[in-house]
Amino acid sequence: MLKAMRKLTKQILWIVIAAFVGTIIFAWGMEFSGKKGQRRGIIATVNGEDIQAYAFQYYYDQALRRAEKEQGDIDEETAARIRDEVYNSMVNEILFRQEAQKRGIEISDAELYEYMRRYPPEEIRQHPAFQTPEGQFDYQKYLQALNDPRVPWGQVEDMIRPNLRLSRLQQSVTSLVRVTDDDVKQYYQDQGEQVKIQYVYVPAIQFQNKDLTVSEDQIKAYYQQHQQEFRVEPTADLNYVEFDKVASDEDVQEVKQRIMDIKQELDQGEDFADLAMDYSEDPSTAENGGDLGWFGKGAMVPEFEQAAFSMKPGEVSDPIRTQFGWHLIQLEEKRGSGDKEEVKARHILLQIKPSENTITLLKEQADNFLEQESQSSFSEAAKDMNLEVQETGWFTQGGTIRNLGNNGQVKDFAFGNDQGKVSDVIETARAFYVFQVKDRRPAGTSPLTEVEPTVRQKLIRAIADSLAFEKAQSIMAQIDQGESLKKAAEDNDAKFAETQDFSRSGFIPGVGNPPELIGTAFSLTQPGQISQPVKTNLGSFIVELVSRIEPSDSVFSADKDSLMMVVLQQEQSQVYQDWFAQVKKEADIQDYRSEFFREY
């Protein structure tokens, strides 16, 4: 019994870990706030409440690992976006909690228990520890564990309580939202009213593909008359050298030795699933004992597939290296044959990452580069150390940097120093960098020499739009003489189509939902009525109404109550978004990321 309870405790802890990895919880501010007024180790303050650097780094690392598992290698721009998402989530959660405290919103232990009893968390419902042999959720097993003091439910409660508090806050903010019968009627009409149309379409791109030309005088005139379009922020261009955080041969061998040690434990009779839960670094399967389920050929990388399909049921592979790291595979079953052959297997994964020692050596190399640069020049130091000098290209303070994304620390250096200045070593999730300001430009209007291609394209597009509209007008003249839309389109090499019924929020295959086209279609009231040519961002259209479906009043009466709830929920959602936007706007948020994290 005690062994079973220890196993259940481990499973509960895995559930908690998985849930924390998958979401950012409402209680962050409570758990990680520190002394106010100190900026050491603090990446931000929210109305005087601190966000600790170690908390931010922990959740950022978890989010980055999830993204790497789902997408493979993550570029610097994606890593920067993830950092910003984690930061914004932490700020938002603290603001939510502060607002809940202002309103005196708390969740009692009795309320929490009743909620957990009535609504088992989805992670619990899906976990094998709480399922029947047939794979169904076993509610009685859950209740038994819920009332067992040896099971660490406190950690699950800490995850759920903030979510309940947030739900109560949302109810408090939106409790006064009301919708009228007229609001519901308008929603019903917008959703229920449908039209079917025929149309002639003259794409502007037909004319852009021809040899349209504009004169230099036209380009200059447009540039002079639209100066505001070409205003730019300060821009900078940097040289840099990069020291990639790549695992060394020693790191690879160290991980290999660890996987061989695990293999030795298996050879001595240890359970594969238990060791997978203890050691595997595959977050999607570790809590399930490394279970990969059934898979066929082509589903795994070649090295993994070759090993799995060559094994016999019950066998455990020797260590196998793939792009993801070192693996051990246990084959459980086989079925099918030939191209339809499938296997059921488990695996243990140890990821290959640069060790702390490797990271330290890379940092030392970057420091050595800085020292050599101070005694010679940026380019000479790079040449002496066999490093490639790369260039960011021009970027603005509000834009992204090629290969680096939206990196605040690099931008602070670029726009805070003069040409030729060399940065300290800057660290990101992927590498160490040393930058040099190659050039800078102040804010102003981009010179015509730089924007001339853009101006030329704008003018050509305007000409193409006009030519498309002129052609639509000539087609309209034929239609006015009694020609059908289809025949007029064929005579003029234009496109003709008839739609299915669609609503105001609908989508027309092949053209999407240009608002001018949708508005024109719904402005027609009688079948056979034809519009005048209308311009859109795609080209020009002539529209004929085929049929119109008016929403039924009797159906509205029958569906009114359910529609009332839909409209109310939409209004509540909008009110809540507007309310929180105002809360955030009025909050005193101090962002110190650029001072405490080299990634920024």
Image (spheres, helix red, strand yellow):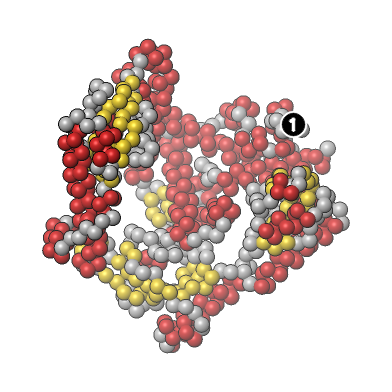
Q: Residue 436: percent from the left, percent from the top?
A: 39, 76
Q: Is residue 462 above or below residue 261?
A: above
State the residue at coordinates (48%, 54%). 82
Image-quadrant location for residue 138: top right
State the residue at coordinates (54%, 74%). 363
* Screen quadrant of the N terminus: top right
Q: Residue 572: percent from the left, percent from the top?
A: 39, 29
Disc 1 marks a residue whose amino acid type is Glu
Q: Residue 431: percent from the left, percent from the top?
A: 51, 68
Q: Is residue 435 left or right of residue 429?
A: left
Q: Is residue 462 above or below residue 552?
A: below
> Can residue 354 be spotted in the picture?
yes
Q: Which residue is mark 1?
A: 134
101 or 16, nearer to the observer: 16
State the residue at coordinates (82%, 60%). 264
Image-quadrant location for residue 100: top left
> Can residue 505 be spotted in the picture?
no
164 or 329, nearer to the observer: 329
Q: Is residue 210 above or below residue 486?
A: below
* Screen quadrant of the C terminus: bottom left
Q: In terms of secondary structure, where does tag 1 sit? A: loop
State the residue at coordinates (25%, 52%). 207
